[in-house]
Amino acid sequence: SQKIEQNSEALNIQEGKTATLTCNYTNYSPAYLQWYRQDPGRGPVFLLLIRENEKEKRKERLKVTFDTTLKQSLFHITASQPADSATYLCALDEMDSGYALNFGKGTSLLVTP
Amino acid sequence: KAGVTQTPRYLIKTRGQQVTLSCSPISGHRSVSWYQQTPGQGLQFLFEYFSETQRNKGNFPGRFSGRQFSNSRSEMNVSTLELGDSALYLCASSLRDRQFFGPGTRLTVL
């Protein structure tokens, strides 16, 4: 069966450190992978998209890697801040046309001062 | 531009009733997707509409249906509500592979 797995346990790190979140998938052939941030009571907010032919993508303090052989994506937040505390979701889309994102259940990140 | 709006924000219904949720996408976005979010199952894709046509569909029973109007606004309907339908229903409009989510409608079924 198809699965998208993210660290189920919350990740607690100190301000200034690098947070690394993992997304593993099985039985998918994604055209691309996306990362979203979700705060309590709000809809997810798009952060980064990486395509199957890309190895790494960066945006400000964020970095995503995508290894289609390992079927894994890593999401890094460098110089983390308390404002980065949220749940982070990875999502895959296999569709040739349109959108039908399959989401992991998310990893909760807590950055403490 | 205004973001994705969803109405109502909160809804309480009883088992067996039906409900209609509304979504207004960002101006210019023609694709609207619907998702159900529960603590146990996470975010699950319901369906996607583009130019008034359902383009993709998730694995939900026929009680869940939707439509899209010519102005890209979308509605989803759930008939014969069950307790397990209690969830946050999220709508997203799309542009170039990015999805922009609304704040969601929190549905509670008693």
Image (spheres, coloured by chain):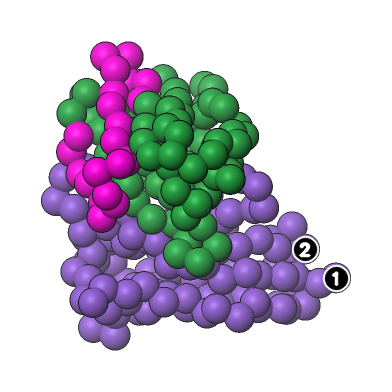
Q: Are marks 2 and 1 in contact (CB under 8 Å)?
A: yes
Residue at (50%, 66%) from the top-left corner? B40
* Residue A102 in picture, x, y percent from top left: 33, 59
Quadrant placement of the N terminus of chain A: bottom left
Q: Residue furthest bottom?
A: A70
Q: Which mark is residue A82?
A: 2
Q: Is residue B95 visible?
A: no
Question: From the viewer's perspective, is residue B27 above or below residue B101?
Answer: above
Q: CA distance from mark 2 to mark 1?
A: 6 Å
Q: Is residue A10 left or right of residue A65?
A: right
In depth, the one of B96 and B35 nearer the eye is: B35
Question: From the viewer's perspective, is residue A30 above or below residue A8?
Answer: above
Q: Which chain is the one coloured purple?
A: A
Quadrant placement of the C terminus of chain A: bottom right
Question: From the viewer's perspective, is residue A27 above or below residue A98?
Answer: below
Q: Is residue A44 left or right of residue A48?
A: right
| Displayed quadrant of residue B92 | top left
B72 is within the stretch colored magenta: yes
Residue at (65%, 77%) from the top-left corner? A10
B4 is within the stretch colored magenta: no
Q: In this figure, which residue is indicated by the disc labeled 1?
A: A113
* Residue A53 in picture, x, y percent from top left: 22, 66
Q: Chain of mark 2?
A: A
| Displayed quadrant of residue B52 | top left
Q: Residue furthest left?
A: A96
* Residue B62 in picture, x, y percent from top left: 24, 43
Residue at (36%, 73%) from the top-left corner? A4
The colour assigned to chain B within the rendered structure: green
